[in-house]
Image (spheres, grey):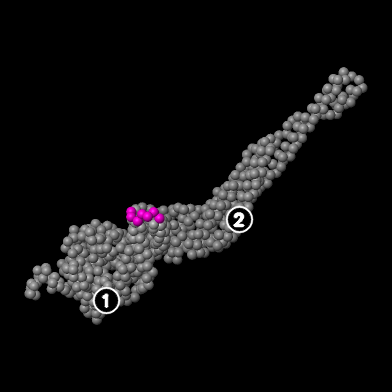
Amino acid sequence: MSTGLQDFSGAYAKRFQEAAVIEAEDRGKLAGVLADFADDIDAVSRQAVEERQRISDHDAWKQREAQRNAFVQASGGGGVGVAVPLWEFVTDHEPSTTPITPKPLTAAFHARQRPHSAGGDGSGKSSADPTHLRTFVSTTRSADSDADTELQRLQTAWSSFKASCSWAVVDGQSALSGFRQYLQHNESDCTWSEHVASAFEKAGGAGVLPDMVLAVATNGRTPPVLDALFAEGLTPAEVAKRWAALGLSKADAPALRALPQSVLEKLGNLEGVAYWARDAANRSVLGLRIDQVQSQLATAQTGSAWSGQYGTPFQQQIASLEKELKALLNIEATLGKKGEGARSLVSLTDDVPPLAAVSIGDLDTADNVTWAVPGMNTTTADMSSWTNAAQNIYNQQIVAAGEGERAVISWIGYETPGETTVLGMDKAEAGAEKLAASVHGLDAVRADGMPTTNIVAHSYGTTTAGVALSRSDIHVDRFVALASAGLPDAVDSADDLHAGEVYAGQARNVLFDEGGKGDEWATVGRSFSHGHHVDPSKPGFGATTFGANGGTAADGTTTNPVLHHDPLNADGGGYLDQNTETLYNVGAATTGRKDKLTEFDPTPPTVRDQWLLGVRDPDGGE
């Protein structure tokens, strides 16, 4: 037991020590009870011998007495010959006729329960060296194995004694069952110690762990402090307050790996929890899910091949697993990509494919935070692509304003629309709820030192952001709309958005078959949608517009034109590609460098498009 206590401190060390005291006391009591029981059995055994001897002696005496009586009767009652039997009548006394009462056998022992909970609300910390705990477990189990052998010997001996000595009176015998109970409690101590050791090993070895982590590891259920954190109906501000009460810091991030997956999944997506903790939780879940999906996929593929069923349901299952795995691996690769700003995984849902958000830069300390909100057909299966766009924003902010504490969130936190739903509002309204929740989460975590906040949205992302910013309970400092597929019809002007400043960037509008000459899709969304027709780049809307068609900025920077609706394009002509005029302006707008913005100089449609639209005659005249 002393080995396990080495380098063990905190509430869980106290429980370990208390259990050790109870174990030692019970062991001593058990030994005493068994020793007394053995003495009593020996005494009863001696009494049994004495009783058998008494019975035998009395039987022999009765036989002699009968012989004497027969002799006297045969002698007629007189004569010299009668003297000897008469003398024996006087000298051969009858042995005791009183049976010996055996000493009642009593052996009472009950092993006491041992404390394994740290008590309290789980907000403390404990330290341990898992190596010492493993040594304790090994030593204890070895000793208990020998003790179990001895217990079996005692049980066999007791059964034999009862069978051979039914004369004995058993007044109560709980010592042997108590012995078994004692060994079971010892095994519980070992299992508990193994769970504690495993928790420390998952967290990297010897060190310090929050008691809430150990509570889950040892008891298999969340302690009150986590139950309170996960209570339904809490606002992000209430969550943040309860999280702060735990007293955890970034140094505790490795400790969170010891929590079970179900707890980590909640923690990683809970708005109001510090972002370092969410990152640690989500990274652990990501690794676990990759392993699980790979295993499930291998099983499904094996089952399909073995059964010869390459259609449904095996192929449907395989296709779903492959889709999920592709996204998970892409998220993992995105996190591992090196560049300016450390990356963290601040959300990861269990959808297929999952929704996720990767932050470039530290959200817990950044002075400037930007949400990058994507449009149609953006999923985590290509997380790396949208995160490349977010990285370009991050890098351009450095160019615009110099080094500083900033973060850009590659936010694929909503289910973006496909071709059949992009003209409607359902995806935008559902996504707006999640975007608003994310903003509220930052407000709560950074309440003591709010950073400047920006939303940069592209295409249908502007529709989603527009719905979110129409709410009275949300506010950001700046909103930048790129290639807008149309803001909600209820948004009549920039003043209807809860943003300190509103910006819009729109490249030349071309028809859908002229990609490479301008934005071929934004006007389709604005013109043919059901509920999002508003063009924020129009003069009457009230946004600050900026250039998108290439040129030279006031500071001498030469920029490229936007040639596609895409955020990124292989030819470098996407809205957020490096060196484009829109990226240059996004960097300036989101860092407060309004003085650097280039002027909005709308380029008219191509000659062909003007002719098709009836604004130019075939001969080139107006």
Secondary structure at badge 1 equals loop
- The residue sitting at 23% across, 65% down in the picture is 459
The residue that label 2 is drawn on is 142
The residue that label 1 is drawn on is 579
From the top left corner, tell me how far across and down residue 431 is, in percent. 27, 59
Determine crowd level at label 2: few under 14, some 14-19, many 20+ residues with C-alpha closer than 10 A: few
From the top left corner, tell me how far across and down residue 586 is, in percent. 26, 72
Mark toward the start of the polypeptide (1 vs 2): 2
The reply to whether dot 1 and dot 2 touch (C-beta < 8 Å) is no
From the top left corner, tell me how far across and down residue 424 is, in percent. 21, 58
Quarter of the rendering containing residue 475: bottom left
Q: Which residues are drawn in magenta?
A: 306-312
Please tell me which residue lies in front, 72 or 127. 72
| Residue located farthest toward the top when viewing the structure as drawn | 76
In the rendered structure, which amino acid carries the disc numbered 2? Ser
Height in image: 252 above or below 221? below
Q: Left or right of 291: which side holds 24?
A: right
From the top left corner, tell me how far across and down residue 369 is, in percent. 32, 68
Residue 481, which numbered label? none
- The residue sitting at 82% across, 27% down in the picture is 64
In the rendered structure, which amino acid carries the disc numbered 1? Asn
The N terminus - image quarter:
bottom right
